[in-house]
Amino acid sequence: MVPVVAEGRNWRGALVRATVRLEPVAGDGAEREARWLLREVAGVERAWPVLLDEEPTHADLARFDSMVDRRALGEPLQYVIGHWPFRSVDLIVDERALIPRPETEQVVEVALAELDGLGVAGPVVVDLGTGTGAIALSIAVERPEVWVLGIEASRPALELAMENRDRVGLGVKRVAFAAGSWFSMLPGDLHGAIDLIVTNPPYVATGDDIDPSVRDWEPSGALFAGVDGLDDLRVTISQAPEWLAPHGVLVAEIGATQSDAVRALATDAGFVHAEVRPDFAGHDRILIARRHGAPGPRQERRSVP
Ligand SMILES: C[S@@+](CC[C@H](N)C(=O)[O-])C[C@H]1O[C@@H](n2cnc3c(N)ncnc32)[C@H](O)[C@@H]1O
């Protein structure tokens, strides 16, 4: 009997209680999530068995319990933890912006390959709808020669992106953020001069049934795009060619059922090549639209703005 009382006082007991508490929201993932929260509070220095046998301080236990309470009420784990990894960067995440998703990491992978294929020095990249700044900042970190401009319509999200720029140690000379709706506030000297436009715009249809934790907690302005979910992709795809350099490329994340529609939009907009690639789950999620038919070096780089 005694070990039960002793266990109740150590992290192991707290973990068991938290797992039970999280089961209604996290199901099979409840213990994994409880462990994640525990690691966040207790730190990562000790081996797991050592940590579980430790008795938490009152302050640590109170913090852990409060995080478990928030998660039990349905708040996404990432918001509760307050930061989350995205490729090469660890970003502050909160209710001001969409939580960056693993499939968007793959969008960045494709965007980087396109960028590398252009073979231009000091390329200019624009990230439309930057949110936390995930795409813009990871591209800038992974390709130090790139200059990135992130555009965002939501002021709170824009502030978060700027905080994340500080967090990853980049300055405005590498990554600039600006408020605006898609292309409306882009500086005129970028007209016809952008090497790569990358975007993960809202693409959920307004009537779609989505996960309650997404619908209730993440900003609706980051999710919904009209009755067919294509309102924002129509704008970004149709206007992208005039902002891109003649060799320029658009890479966009799309909804899994939008492949045919976005390929048609890209062709109508004048892109010579439009293809959609699957994500890791096999869903068609990444549009690549090139102003020229094939990747490869195009021209000498002009001066960077
Ligand atoms: C799906 S989220 C993507 C956020 C981030 N790029 C990512 O991948 O995690 C779409 C973002 O577009 C922004 N957005 C919505 N409408 C916009 C508009 N008209 N102009 C610029 N950004 C917009 C939203 O506020 C949101 O941050």
Image (tube, rainbow, N blue to C red):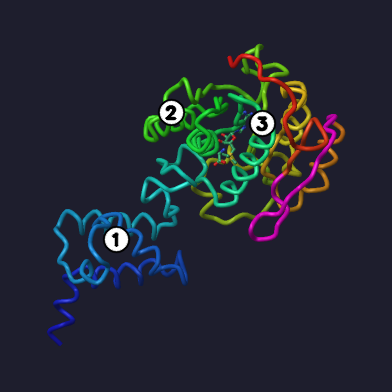
- Asked if marks 2 and 3 touch (Cβ < 8 Å), the reply is no
Apparent side of residue 118 relative to residue 169 in the rendered image (left or right): right
Name the quadrant where ligand 1 sits: top right
Q: Nearer the viewer, residue 187 or 193?
A: 193
Please give the label number shown on residue 38: 1
- Amino acid type, mark 3: Gly
Question: Which residue is depicted at the point 54% across and 22% down?
Answer: 179
**Relative to 96, residue 63 above or below:** below
Place of residue 146 in the rendered image (x, y in percent of width and height, measured from the top left): 55, 28
| Quadrant, the C terminus | top right
Please give the label number shown on residue 162: 2
* Crowd band around label 1 with a 10 angstrom C-alpha radius: few (<14), some (14–19), many (20+): many
- Mark 2–mark 1 Cα distance, whole angstroms, equals 29 Å
Place of residue 143 in the rendered image (x, y in percent of width and height, measured from the top left): 53, 34
- Amino acid type, mark 1: Leu
Q: Earlier in the sequence, mark 2 or mark 1?
A: 1
Task: Find the magenta span and give its range.
Answer: 269-286
Residue 14 within the magenta-colored segment of the rendering: no
Look at mark 3 in the image and give the residue it sits on.
Answer: 119
